Amino acid sequence: MHWHINYMYLCSPKFELMENRRVRLRFAPSPTGGLHMGGVRTALFCYLFAKKHNGDFILRIEDTDQTRYVNGAEEYIINSLKWCGIEPNEGVGFGDGPHAPYRQSERKELGVYKKYAEQLIADGHAYYAFDTSEELDAMRKRLEAAKVVAPQYNAVTRQSMRNSLTLSEDEVKKLMDAGTPYVIRLKVPRNEEIRFHDIIRGWVVVNSTQVDDKVLLKSDGMPTYHLAHIVDDIEMEISHAVRGEEWLPSAPAHILIYRFLGKEDKMPLLAHLPLILKPDGNGKLSKRDKSGIPMFPLNWYDERTGESYVGYRETGFFPEAFVNMLAMLGWNPGTPQEIFTKEELIQAFSFERVNKSGAKFDPEKTKWFNQQYLRKKSDAELAELFKPILEEKLKALSSDFRLPTSSYLEGVCKLVKEKSHFVSEFWDAGSYFFIAPTNYDAEVIKKRWNDAAANFIKAVTEAFKGLSTFTAAETEAAFKKTAETQGIATGQVMQLFRVCVSGVGGGPMLFEMVELLGKDEVVKRLETAVSVIGEGVKA
């Protein structure tokens, strides 16, 4: 489809807010699977805008396609929004408002959609189509054989199909009386210019020859998305309709429906969000992309495909970090600021600063966001989060284990958090705080261990034994004084000393680590290291 977008008309505040109309935005997912992060971003932007303008954020479940309904998907959507902290104030799972019910299947039972479809029929803007699937396939094949680029049911092709525009009234009545299955299609006018304004993209102009006659009501009486969401947006008084740019080609048909219903004054302002792209920018990010980072907020098992997806929550992301990251995908505040509280996001957000082009998803940047929030948490908070992980690890080593004191655990978290992205990394980063090393970094030993180094380790051990207090400052001073006395540069033995204490060649601040472990533990580890490493070198 060819689009003409006039960027001379850039979106401005007058397009964002409508006078004398309450701001009401809806997130309207289909319960056909897990809630992909692109859907969460749509919900987030709706939430932020609604809260900024003291409006309403609504959750509506669009379950018109019952053949694709997945058990558990609705609950998953609700739980995902709750975990993210972007909860609607009205809708499925969050309490009824004045426009309940909020499931389209329930609204269908009330006859809401059929009433609007019949109005379109009566006004000559829609028609009954009795074509079988075989007839539709034959039509598409004829068009393909004629080299038609985009075969569709439209103002030209409908003239050769079985519908109430080509059949007589008597023929239509006989078919309906006989219970012949039919759908109701939108009657798109031929060769007419359709113009509409998108908050993000400016003015969009499309010729109606590029718009097909959308099915509005299916043969089972269930409305399609094209009719249902418009009816619901009218009746729920939605002020802004926000969705992904993949829906942009359908927008002209939706504009026509509002016009044909005489409800242009009830039409919400449109905002089509840019795609979230793969890390290399090559194509849309899919839930099946294996980028090392989850695509769903929570764990999701797809019962149709048998595939399991790990969620951000289960991977160890903080919800506020996930939300902060998501907000920056396709939106920018116009300042260098990257870390925002939810309240700051609400105040800063506007659709004016949503990009038109796609946003590249960066897995490493995503982890960076979590790292920033991890660092901002208190050591006590982190200790509580780490405690169950530590308990599981220690239990695996011995059934007769004891958890360290809270103050010790907080001290460990303080030291290891600076180089960690997740609390789950604390064990790998600092298991030696809980179990003495039995193996020592082979590369460091090979490079640094010799008689002079061994004598230094023995000497610094004795120096530590003589300390009355065992602080980071005092152990560092004793370390340097011993090196000076031994006539050895500290740089020659610093890493080796670390390996003797922890078993590994890198880690947090060295003498803060020594202080936390305590005098007795450090002395014992140094003596063990001299014995074990010395025997290993001789062997």
Image (spheres, helix red, strand yellow):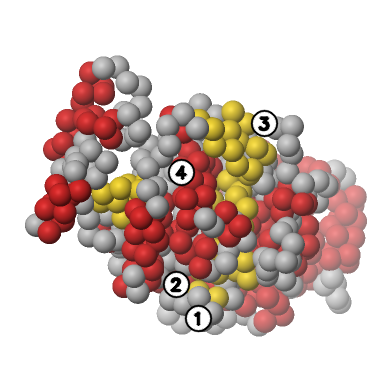
Q: Are marks 2 and 1 in contact (CB under 8 Å)?
A: yes
Query: In the image, residue 187 lies at what x, y percent?
Result: 37, 43
Q: Are marks 2 and 4 in contact (CB under 8 Å)?
A: no
The answer to which quarter of the image holds residue 218 is bottom left
Q: Tell me the CA gap for discs 2 and 1.
A: 8 Å
- The residue drawn where x is 85% and y is 51% is 483
Query: What is the three-letter code of the residue carrying label 3?
Result: Asn
The answer to which quarter of the image holds residue 340 is bottom right
Query: What is the three-letter code of the residue carrying label 4?
Result: Ala
Q: Which residue corresponds to mark 2?
A: 102
Q: Which residue corresponds to mark 1?
A: 96
- Asked if residue 240 is positioned above or below residue 435 in the image, the reply reads above
Q: Earlier in the sequence, mark 1 or mark 4?
A: 1
Report helix, strand or loop for mark 4.
helix
Q: Which residue corresponds to mark 4?
A: 253
Q: Tell me the CA gap for discs 1 and 4.
A: 30 Å
Query: In the image, residue 182 lies at what x, y percent?
Result: 21, 51
- The residue drawn where x is 47% and y is 50% is 260
Classify 10 Å Cα crowding around label 4: few (below 14), some (14-19), many (20 and above): many
Q: Tell me the CA gap for discs 2 and 3.
A: 36 Å
Q: Are marks 1 and 4 in contact (CB under 8 Å)?
A: no
